[in-house]
């Protein structure tokens, strides 16, 4: 049933309907509303059985989730920004141990300078942590992706990060169809862990592995991610048939077919991009959009197929790899190495990506007037003064 | 791509206990080995008792097994528990920790338990057809008879006294050794088929050496040593051993109310204490040296003092009159020898008892070819055999300490050698293991536990009767006391090695079976050896 | 299950086993059916106190829980020597995640078990002193403060041994480590048992590998409580302490007999029992056999350091009443 509801609240209610057995919480904006809402649901008994653990740090949060998951419980937590980095060591551990934890990342910049606003620096920094990363375009998708995330995670024994833009999505109140309990139950079977800490069937989990086997372990982890490339679209399809709604999957082409220029982006900025592209197309510009829902594993084939007809590619990035440039660009380049790609760094630390600026930018792009690495709305006077 | 194992992720998840494939024994340079070291108590026991072993049985509450273990070496546990001077306790390692184990009191408990329960010894060896004569039914002779009978020999014991026991009956006063105990323990030997011929003085060995396959002599030392004390005609001077023997035979010695006892040994104490019991108001021991130099055991001196016996140290009797003696004060020179001072004193004394030691009457052997006599005693070799083939001797009549326990030990040793000699063999004593000295032990593991004291009669009762002064332990106390033993040098199955091995490399074989080292996994750290409470493990080098 | 402390006069009553005791009074380690939670084939150094301590503790826990316990282990020697692929020495369910998060992982396991209604299964977290008093302290303190149903065991060998004997917050004053080559100049800064007690958790206890009976008693007693419990076990490390492999237990014993390591237990943050020193000794007896203190007795003896270590021990003796006569009322 569709209702006017805050994004965080919608996610919290959806997560609750996925029946997590352990939820750990540590406050950080802009994620906090999600766990607050979950704590209310647990306290009221609406979500039960579930242990809500107020941890002492994000490192603790992920560690509690690791323990819970290893003991066979469906485990969930949420974080953002500094918090995600604070749990970095445990992120790698969770994926290495093959624990199907689901975590929401309410994307936010990372400091210094400290900045609480939205961009993708946090989740991008953990792109190689072995987690599956799904990026929500809308709050509806954010909610839906959580249901799918548990399915994917548990089918693959891999943790999944659902990334949703901080404030832009988390704090936006809009009409959202929160999946009902019946629907979720029909879609998401109870967690059947592949290995569990159990006195009835003791095993050693988390051995030390040396040079003789480490490569194979890593190879197998990669193979699991490759399998995810099949699992994710299948789960999205199943979701669509259960919920009569399309969300998730690997990529989301929008008018790519026959477009000379394709803009590649992730997250909520896709809405503005699509609006701008709509206008340009109405004016006869041959331009399309490719939304990346799945960033890890990187869907090389799907991206290559979507970009097959494009003559030029613009990658709109919400994070910057200093000294290198666009993080997503590098991966897209891996799909289409022969195509000219322009990187646009936009919306860092919460700077709005406006339709007006985008329109100017894309107009330039189509005219091949863009620098290979362009910063949207960069205050040139400031940087030039500082650099001089 | 399918996973290697969908339930056990490759390499990260492992099967429990799979490290058994890793044989860490290859790390080892030293290996633990179980061994039995010689406990100091065993080492000190003149009768060669396996003290540690029988105490261990007693600890378990199996008193009969404990008693039978004593009986392997010594047929007189109840007597030992009363009169033995307890060299075992002097040697006991526990003395270094707190107080020695009350070995002797446990032994007495076991001996008494055996008497009251009627435990007996059955001769299992088939008769050998050999006849052995034992001359003297004192502890040494009876011990030899017992051990020979156990080995299937026919033994005849001849003694000139009306009853058997030697000094155990005619010397040691009954308030220390009750005669029913002596009777019971001798009776047990008789029941094994030993023939006792009492009231039979053996004056000539010529026939015996022909009639018997072997002879063991144990006639003791009964002749009181005299001192030339100028004395008045009416002075009453008696000899200690004769006096005690007479008393044992039912005579009432006439000592008077004031008795001077001359000498500083145990016999002197016994005489003085006996005099008190016979009604002497004043019993004074006169001894030429100091208390520290008295040969009497400290406990005997203490008990005598408790009973009102007075001591005159550094004094000699120079004249004995009808009702008084004259004594000269002495002083010790640098070498500790008493020297006269020329100072005199008089003491009231109705009689003087001489307790200056005993000599052996060796008339019996004086003319036998080969027999060597030196320092008033018969010389024997390591087999307890005299220079005359087939003639063995032991106890007070041969060199050595003159105690019941030594006499018993001699009897056992002689029996073993006679047995071998009768078979034309030689007895090989098992190799003596390394001594379990205190530093071999890890005493931390033993709980702090003070020794249990034996109850004693109150003094008033003591000086008015010949009732036994020292009482026995209760079963509970005996058990407690036994459990104080540290099992020096011998595995006590405490499981410490089994527990302290960080590599689980010790296999526990079950009660009475001990342990085994699993050399596949033993890394040779040495913790088991270091932490063995009793020092029953050693490390031996395997490679450098 | 009530636990009776064995305190009677008897041969070997402090020894591991005792053939004279009723079977139910015998130690877990005396039992041939003990779990052997950490079994043979592990790669701990010869005479490793940590290997010994871990088996002691977990076997007792297994007995106390009817074999219904799971373990979470921090990174460190114990983890490395027990689980190098392809062999594990554990016979209990065991999970290793990271160096600094074992208490939190244990919390997660406990939370999962609670949510699943498996209250029959109990959780033990364990790690070295580095993993506990230093890097894991945040997670541990959180676990304590929430009173999660976890027994956390610290195996204190006074340093980061697995990485080659570096100083940790539990390295004693004066000890040489590879990062304190001239001897640790700090006092023993963190007494984690006291820190644990300050959290007012239901049960805190210290023990050593030198007194198995006491250690088993405490591990067993800990399982009678629910909520956060902390057991701090002194486990000498022959490599790091530079002692002979056969001395491990002896050294632990000296640590207690000199007052250097107080052995006590506390319920709800208050000391309820201390193990009295049986044969009081000067700290020098404890320090001298250890190579890590050799410089204190070298060509230029460091009497100042020794007396300051002695003063620390005296303080322990006073504050905990470790000697009968100094008992505080
Ligand atoms: C008063 C006193 C108290 C003592 N107290 C203790 C004590 O508390 N503890 C201790 O350990 N020791 C004690 N002793 C010493 C101990 O009694 C002797 O060392 C021990 O009895 C010696 O034993 P034995 O068999 O050699 O000789 P004895 O016990 O003297 O036995 C020799 C036997 O041979 C008999 N005999 C002698 N000649 C002949 C012969 N020709 N024909 C036949 N039979 C003969 C004797 O009648 C006697 O029965 C004490 C001695 C005395 C005198
Ligand atoms: C986050 C992190 N920092 C450092 C290390 C390296 N490290 C592994 S084990 C260890 C020492 C462990 O010391 P302790 O916890 O005392 O256990 P011990 O090895 O002494 O038993 C260190 C520093 C690590 N694994 N992880
Ligand atoms: S402690 Fe026991 S074994 Fe050791 S000397 Fe004493 S009695 Fe003998
Ligand atoms: S370094 Fe120390 S703690 Fe580590 S295995 Fe060796 S002895 Fe044990
Ligand atoms: Mg350590």
Image: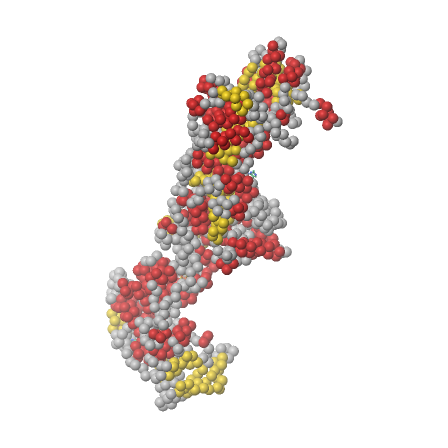
Q: Is residue B207 visible?
A: no
Can you tell me which quadrant of the image ligand 2 is in?
Answer: top right
Name the image quarter holding residue B394: bottom left
Name the quadrant of the C terminus of chain A.
Answer: top right
Q: Position of residue A329 (x, y in %)?
A: 61, 21
Where C75 falls versus C308 (above or below)? above
- Residue at 40 percent across and 81 percent down: it is B284
- Residue at 56 percent across and 19 percent down: it is A291
Name the image quarter holding residue B128: bottom left
Scheme of colours in the image: secondary structure
- Residue at 51 percent across and 19 percent down: it is A247
Q: Position of residue A209 (x, y in %)?
A: 51, 35
Query: Farthest residue toward the right?
Result: A388
Between residue B59 and residue A287, name the one nearer to us. A287
Where A133 falls versus C15 (above or below)? above
- Residue at 52 percent across and 36 percent down: it is A55
Q: Position of residue C316 (x, y in %)?
A: 54, 54
């Amino acid at each position: 049933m569709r209702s006017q509801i805050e994004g965080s609240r919608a996610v919290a209610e959806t997560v609750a309907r996925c029946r997590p057995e352990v939820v750990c919480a540590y406050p950080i904006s802009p994620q906090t509303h999600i766990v607050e809402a979950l704590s209310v649901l647990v306290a009221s008994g609406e979500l039960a059985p579930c242990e809500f653990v107020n941890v002492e740090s994000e490192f603790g949060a992920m560690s509690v989730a690791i323990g819970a998951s290893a003991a066979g419980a469906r485990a969930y937590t949420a974080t953002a920004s500094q918090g995600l980095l604070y749990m970095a060591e445990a992120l790698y551990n969770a994926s290495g141990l093959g624990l199907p934890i689901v975590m929401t990342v309410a994307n936010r910049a990372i400091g210094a300078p400290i900045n609480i606003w939205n961009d993708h620096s946090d989740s991008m920094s953990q792109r190689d942590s072995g987690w599956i990363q799904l990026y929500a375009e809308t709050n509806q998708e954010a909610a839906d992706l959580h249901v799918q995330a548990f399915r994917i995670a548990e089918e693959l024994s891999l943790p999944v990060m659902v990334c949703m833009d901080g404030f832009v999505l988390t704090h936006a109140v809009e009409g959202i169809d929160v999946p009902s309990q019946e629907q979720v139950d029909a879609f998401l079977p109870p967690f059947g862990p592949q290995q569990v800490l159990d006195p009835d069937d003791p095993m050693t989990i988390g051995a030390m592995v040396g040079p003789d086997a480490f490569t194979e372990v890593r190879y197998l982890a990669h193979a699991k991610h490759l399998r995810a490339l099949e699992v994710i679209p299948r789960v999205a399809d199943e979701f669509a048939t259960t919920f009569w709604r399309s969300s998730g999957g690997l990529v989301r082409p929008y008018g790519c077919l026959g477009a000379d220029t394709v803009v590649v982006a992730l997250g909520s900025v896709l809405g503005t991009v699509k609006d701008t592209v709509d206008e340009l197309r109405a004016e006869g510009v041959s331009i399309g959009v490719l939304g990346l829902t799945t960033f890890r594993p990187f869907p090389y084939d799907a991206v290559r197929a979507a970009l097959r007809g494009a003559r030029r590619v613009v990658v709109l990035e919400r994070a910057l790899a200093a000294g290198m440039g666009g993080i997503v660009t590098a991966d897209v380049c891996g799909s289409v190495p022969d195509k000219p790609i322009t990187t646009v760094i936009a919306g860092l630390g919460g700077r709005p990506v406006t339709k007006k600026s985008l329109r100017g930018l894309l107009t330039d792009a189509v005219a091949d007037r863009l620098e290979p690495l362009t910063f949207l709305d960069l205050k040139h006077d400031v940087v030039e003064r500082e650099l001089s | 791509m399918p996973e290697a194992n969908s339930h056990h992720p490759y390499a990260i998840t492992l099967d429990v206990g799979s490290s058994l494939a890793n044989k860490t024994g290859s790390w080892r340079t030293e290996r633990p080995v179980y061994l039995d070291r010689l406990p100091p108590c065993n080492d000190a026991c003149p009768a060669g008792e396996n003290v540690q072993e029988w105490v261990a049985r007693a600890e378990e509450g199996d008193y009969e097994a404990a008693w039978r273990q004593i009986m392997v070496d010594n047929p007189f546990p109840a007597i030992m528990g009363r009169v033995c001077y307890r060299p075992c306790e002097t040697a006991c390692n526990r003395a270094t920790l707190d107080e020695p184990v009350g070995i002797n009191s446990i032994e007495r408990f076991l001996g008494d338990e055996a008497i009251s329960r009627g435990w007996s010894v059955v001769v299992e060896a088939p008769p050998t057809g050999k006849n052995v004569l034992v001359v003297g039914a004192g502890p040494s002779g009876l011990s030899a008879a017992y051990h020979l009978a156990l080995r299937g020999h026919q033994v005849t014991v001849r003694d000139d006294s009306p009853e058997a026991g030697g000094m155990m009956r005619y010397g040691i006063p009954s308030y220390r050794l009750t005669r029913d105990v002596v009777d019971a323990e001798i009776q047990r030997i008789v029941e094994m088929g030993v023939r006792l011929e009492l009231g039979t003085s053996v004056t000539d060995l010529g026939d015996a050496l022909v009639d018997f396959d072997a002879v063991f002599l144990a006639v003791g030392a009964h002749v009181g040593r005299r001192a030339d004390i100028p004395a008045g005609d009416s002075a009453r001077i008696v000899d200690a051993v004769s006096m005690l023997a007479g008393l044992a035979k039912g005579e009432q010695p006439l000592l008077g109310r004031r008795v001077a006892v001359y000498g500083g040994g145990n016999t002197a104490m016994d005489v003085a204490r006996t005099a008190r019991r016979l009604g002497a108001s004043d019993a004074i021991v006169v001894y030429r040296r100091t208390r520290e130099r008295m040969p009497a055991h400290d406990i005997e001196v203490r008990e005598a003092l408790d009973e009102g016996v007075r001591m005159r140290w550094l004094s000699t009797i120079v004249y004995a009159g009808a009702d008084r003696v004259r004594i000269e004060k002495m002083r010790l020179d640098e070498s500790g020898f008493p020297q006269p001072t020329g100072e005199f004193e008089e003491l009231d004394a109705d009689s003087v008892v001489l307790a200056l030691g005993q000599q052996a009457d060796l008339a019996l052997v004086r003319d036998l070819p080969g027999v060597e006599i030196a320092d008033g005693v018969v010389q024997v070799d390591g087999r307890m055999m005299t220079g005359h083939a087939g003639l063995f001797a032991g106890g007070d009549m041969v060199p050595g300490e003159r105690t019941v326990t030594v006499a018993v030990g001699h009897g056992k040793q002689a029996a073993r050698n006679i047995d071998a000699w009768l078979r034309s063999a030689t007895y090989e004593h098992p190799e003596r293991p390394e001594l379990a000295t205190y530093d071999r032990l890890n005493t931390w593991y033993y709980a702090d536990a003070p020794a249990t004291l034996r109850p004693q009669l109150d003094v008033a009762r003591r000086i008015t009767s010949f009732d036994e002064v020292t009482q026995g332990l209760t079963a509970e106390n005996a058990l407690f006391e036994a459990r104080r033993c540290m099992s020096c040098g011998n595995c006590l199955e405490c499981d410490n090695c089994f527990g302290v091995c960080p590599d689980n490399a010790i296999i526990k074989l079950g009660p009475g079976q001990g342990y085994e080292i699993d050399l596949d996994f033993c890394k040779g750290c040495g913790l088991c050896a270091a932490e063995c409470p009793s020092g029953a493990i050693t490390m031996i080098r395997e490679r450098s | 299950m009530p636990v009776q402390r064995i305190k009677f006069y008897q041969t070997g009553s402090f020894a591991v086993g005792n053939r004279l005791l009723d079977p139910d009074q015998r130690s877990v380690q005396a039992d041939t059916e003990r779990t052997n939670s950490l079994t043979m084939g592990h790669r701990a150094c010869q005479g490793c106190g940590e290997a010994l301590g871990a088996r002691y503790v977990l076997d007792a826990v297994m007995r106390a829980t009817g074999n219904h316990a799971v373990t979470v282990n921090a990174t460190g020697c114990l983890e490395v020597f027990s689980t190098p692929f392809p062999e594990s020495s554990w016979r209990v369910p065991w999970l290793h995640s990271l160096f600094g998060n074992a208490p939190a992982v244990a919390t997660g396991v406990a939370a999962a078990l609670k949510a699943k209604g498996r209250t029959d299964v109990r959780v033990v977290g364990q790690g070295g002193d580095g993993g506990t008093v230093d890097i894991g302290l945040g997670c541990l303190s959180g676990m304590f403060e929430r009173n999660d149903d976890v027994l956390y065991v610290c195996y204190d060998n006074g340093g980061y041994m697995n990485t080659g004997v570096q100083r940790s917050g539990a390295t004693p004053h004066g000890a040489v480590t590879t990062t304190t080559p001239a001897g640790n100049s700090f006092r023993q800064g963190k007494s984690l048992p006291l820190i644990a007690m300050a959290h007012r958790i239901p049960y805190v206890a210290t023990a050593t590998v030198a007194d198995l009976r006491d250690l088993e008693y405490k591990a067993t007693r800990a399982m009678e409580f629910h909520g956060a419990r902390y057991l701090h076990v002194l486990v000498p490390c022959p490599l790091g302490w530079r002692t002979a492999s056969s001395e491990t237990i002896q050294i632990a014993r000296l640590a207690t007999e000199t007052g250097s390591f107080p052995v006590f237990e506390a319920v709800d943050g208050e000391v309820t029992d201390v193990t009295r020193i049986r044969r009081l000794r000067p700290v020098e007896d404890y320090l001298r056999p250890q190579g890590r203190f050799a410089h204190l007795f070298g060509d230029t003896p460091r009497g100042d350091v020794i007396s300051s270590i002695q003063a620390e021990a005296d303080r322990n003796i006073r504050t905990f009443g470790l000697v009968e006569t100094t008992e505080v009322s």
